[in-house]
Image (cartoon, rainbow, N blue to C red):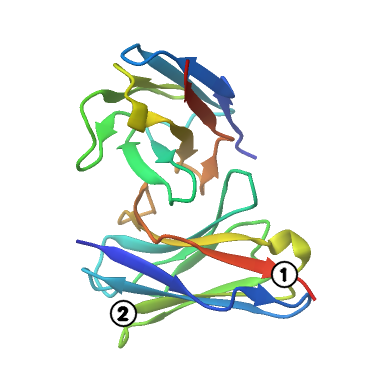
Amino acid sequence: EMVMTQSPATLSVSPGERATLSCRASQSVSSNLAWYQQKPGQAPRLLIYAASTRATGIPARFSGSGSGTDFTLTISSLQSEDIAVYYCQQYNDWWTFGQGTKVEIK
Amino acid sequence: QVQLQESGPGLVKPSQTLSLTCTVSGVSISSAGSYWTWIRQHPGKGLEGIGNIYYTGRTHYSPSLKSRVSMSLDTSKNQFSLRLTSVIAADTAVYFCARAEGVVMPGAIHNWGPGTQVSVSS
C-alpha cells in the first residue's frame, strides 16, 4: 500500500520568507505527483502537477521539484494569503494523499 | 470555465444508501480527457479518494470502498453520481466532486466542487 508522508506537520514562516514543504512516497511514483492548497471551509486548489508544473493561474512564487520518492513544494516569499494546509497526492498507482502540512505565519 | 456543484441529502441514516449528484458546466462529461471523481474529507482530517468514472463508463474505485461504491453518468443532464451503500458513522464527511485530467489514467485533480457535508446519524 502506497503511503505519502509529509513533513513538517506545521510550518511557521515569517512573511516574505521561504517556506519549504516535503513529501515522501513509500515507493517510486515517478513524476506523478500533485500539490494542493486548502483554506478553511474551501475545496482544495491544484497548485502543481507532474511534480513541477504550475497549474493555471498559480503565482510564480509556488514551485515544485523532485521525482521518484522525494518531493518538495517551495513558496519563495510567503504571503498572508498563503496560510493554508498543503497536501501532496500521488496518482501513479490509484490515488494517495499525504496527511497535510499546515503553514502559519510566524 | 469548468464548474462543479454537488447536491444531495445532508443527513443519511445508518445502513441506508448515500446518493450524491454532481452537476458540471463548462465542459461535456462525454468528452475525452476527464475523469469524473469523488473525494471525501472526514472532519478535521485529510483527503480520501472514493473513485472516478471516465466518459466511456469505465470506473475505478478505492480498494477500501469498492464493495459499497458505484458511480454513473447522465450525459443528458451533464451530471455524474455517487452511490455508497450500507453507510456507517465513519462515512460522515465532506464529499467533493471533481475533475481529474488524464487519458490512459486519471491524473491530478484540476477542478473541484465546493463540497457538501453528509452526516450519518439516526
In the image, A76 versus B75, the foreground residue is A76
Residue that protrudes farthest toward the bottom in the picture = B76
- Left or right: residue B16 versus residue B19 is right
Amino acid type of the residue that numbered disc 2 sits on in the rendered structure:
Asn
At a point 29% along the width and 28% down the height, the residue shown is A52
Residue pictured at 27% horizontal, 60% vertical: B33
Residue corresponding to mark 2: B78
A17 sits left or right of B14 in the view? left
Give percent across and percent down for residue A66.
Answer: 38, 21
Label 2 Cα neighbours within 10 Å, binned few <14 / some 14-19 / many ≥20 = some
Residue closer to the observer: A70 or B122: B122
Q: What is the C-alpha distance between the residues marked 2 and 1?
A: 28 Å
Position of residue A15 relative to residue A3, above or below, is above
In this rendered view, identify the residue nearer to me: B36 or B25. B25
Q: Amino acid at mark 1?
A: Val
Q: Position of residue A8 (x, y in %)?
A: 56, 19
Asked whether disc 2 touches disc 1, contact meaning CB atoms under 8 Å apart, the reply is no
Give the answer, above or below, for where B68 lies relative to A47: below
State the mark number for residue B120.
Answer: 1
Q: Residue at x 34, y 20 (%)?
A: A78
Residue depicted at x 51% and y 19%: A11
